[in-house]
Every structure is written in structure tokens, then in C-alpha cells.
Image (spheres, rainbow, N blue to C red):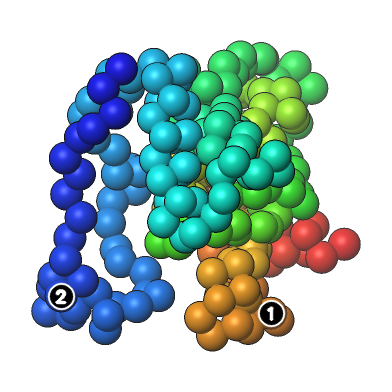
């Protein structure tokens, strides 16, 4: 496998919306609901990707002055590569998307179903450090239901990629609307960003909340009802 490639790295003085990268700093840059991916993102096999990441991460460690011959460090490049591909960024690969079966709503339950406090771990796409939080998901059946664990799996799938919290919220909501065949979906995410707490401003007390209210959830009464469920 050839490890060398030409990767375009924008210069630090490049401009986005008339602001330099230094001026943008830690601020979020708006983009689409889709995770930015190259067209050939899956030309390499997972095995080849791990080999390449291990090679490149070893170079990073070497540049930082770490001794890769040390017993404790020698296996780190491959450990990081396996972690990236098999775990923390596994949601980039569509083959890992959860398969979801719909079932008839035989109980005729017509009120909102709320799955709250779904713990997730993601990574900020700006610094590749963790986002740790909880997702609350609700929907009203259009005649079909899914297993409760599948709600968790949808959250985890989209969380396991470099993320912006606003995009993560919308990706989960969009997927659930398509799967459940209904607009009546709500997603609330409450998360702590380590790029805020462990570096930069170093604020360890703040958290970020994002919401999506679709269909009947986008009304004051339903929002209040959902908040009541979450606060109980």
C-alpha cells in the first residue's frame, strides 16, 4: 500500500467569509447537514486505513519528540488507528449504519414516546477532542414503532464521527423521520465540549444544548409536555 499522498492543507492566512482562520479561532463554521466526506472516502479498506493512520500517527509522535522504541509507546500508533476506524469514528462508514425494522403499533399508543438520557461520546471536528453528552429523543407513532434500543443506536451511529453539535442534532432527527415515516420527532442534546473545557477558554462549567422539534412537537404545548417528561 502506498502511504504517500498529497493532502491539501489550507494556509493559516486563508479567508472564510472575509475572516482569517486565526480570527475564526474556535468558532463554528456553518456547513450542510451532511458530514463533509470525499467522494473516494471508502476506496481504501479498513485494514489499509489502519496501516496508513498508524504510519502517519507515528510520524506525529516522532515530530513531538516521543521515543517510539519505548515499550509503552511502540504500539500506540496502531492502537490509535484501530480506535479511529473501529470505534470513535466508525459512524463515518455507511456499512455500520444500524439496520432498523418497523413494527405495527398494535398497542394503539398515540402519545409521545420519550427515550431520555442516552449517553453518547463524540469528537469535535475542529480539534478532534471529545464531546460528551446526553441525547433525548421523542416521537409519536404514525402507525409504526421501532425497538427502543434502535433509538440509542441511531444516536451512537451519528455521534461516532467528527461532529458539530448542531449537525449531530439534525442528522439524528432526519434519520428518525425517515425511519419512522413521520415528521413528529424531537431531539434534544445537552453536551460538554472538551475543546471548551480542556483548552482555549478552559470553562469547565458550561454546556451546550441544541434542539430539533418536528411536526406536532413544534408547538408550545408539545414542547412544554416534552420538557415535563424530561424534568421528571
Along the line of sight, the residue nearer the viewer: 188 or 185: 188
Q: How many marks?
A: 2
Name the image quarter holding residue 151.
top right
Q: Indicate which disc residue 204 carries.
A: 1
Q: Quadrant of residue 83?
A: top right
Residue at the spot of label 2: 13
Instruction: Bin the neighbour count of mark 1 within 10 Å (Cα to Cα): few under 14, some 14-19, many 20 and up.
Output: few
Residue at figure coordinates x 47%, y 34% from the top left: 54
Residue positioned 21% across, 29% down in the render: 39
- Where residue 107 appears, x then y in whole percent? 79, 22
x then y, percent, for residue 108: 74, 25
Checking the image for residue 116, the label placed there is none
Task: Please state, as top left, top right, bottom left or bottom right, where the C terminus lies in the image.
Answer: bottom right
Label 2: how many residues lie within 10 Å, few (<14), some (14-19) or many (20+)? few
In the image: residue 64, left or right of residue 186: left
Q: Earlier in the sequence, mark 1 or mark 2?
A: 2
Q: Residue at x 67, y 27 (%)?
A: 150
Q: Nearer the viewer, residue 195 or 113?
A: 195
- Residue 199 seen in this snapshot: yes
The reply to whether residue 213 is in sight is no
Quick one: SS at disc 2?
loop
Q: Nearer the viewer, residue 199 or 39?
A: 199
Amino acid at each position: 500500500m502506498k502511504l504517500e499522498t498529497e493532502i491539501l492543507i489550507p494556509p493559516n492566512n486563508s479567508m472564510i467569509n472575509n475572516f482569517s482562520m486565526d480570527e475564526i479561532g474556535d468558532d463554528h463554521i456553518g456547513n450542510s447537514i451532511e458530514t463533509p466526506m470525499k467522494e473516494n472516502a471508502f476506496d481504501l479498506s479498513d485494514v489499509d486505513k489502519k496501516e496508513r493512520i498508524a504510519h502517519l500517527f507515528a510520524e506525529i509522535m516522532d515530530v513531538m519528540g516521543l521515543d517510539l522504541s519505548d515499550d509503552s509507546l511502540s504500539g500506540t500508533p496502531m492502537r490509535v488507528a484501530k480506535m479511529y476506524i473501529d470505534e470513535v469514528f466508525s459512524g463515518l462508514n455507511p456499512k455500520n449504519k444500524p439496520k432498523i425494522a418497523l413494527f405495527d403499533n398494535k398497542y394503539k399508543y398515540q402519545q409521545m414516546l420519550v427515550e431520555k438520557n442516552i449517553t453518547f461520546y463524540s469528537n469535535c471536528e475542529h480539534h478532534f477532542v471529545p464531546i460528551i453528552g446526553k441525547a433525548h429523543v421523542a416521537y409519536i407513532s404514525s402507525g409504526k414503532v421501532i425497538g427502543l434500543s434502535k433509538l440509542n443506536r441511531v444516536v451512537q451511529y451519528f455521534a461516532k464521527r467528527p461532529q458539530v453539535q448542531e449537525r449531530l442534532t439534525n442528522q439524528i432527527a432526519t434519520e428518525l423521520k425517515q425511519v419512522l415515516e413521520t415528521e413528529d420527532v424531537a431531539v434534544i442534546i445537552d453536551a460538554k465540549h472538551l475543546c471548551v473545557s480542556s483548552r482555549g477558554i478552559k470553562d469547565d462549567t458550561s454546556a451546550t444544548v441544541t434542539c430539533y422539534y418536528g411536526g406536532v412537537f413544534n408547538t408550545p404545548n408539545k414542547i412544554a409536555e416534552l420538557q415535563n417528561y424530561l424534568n421528571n
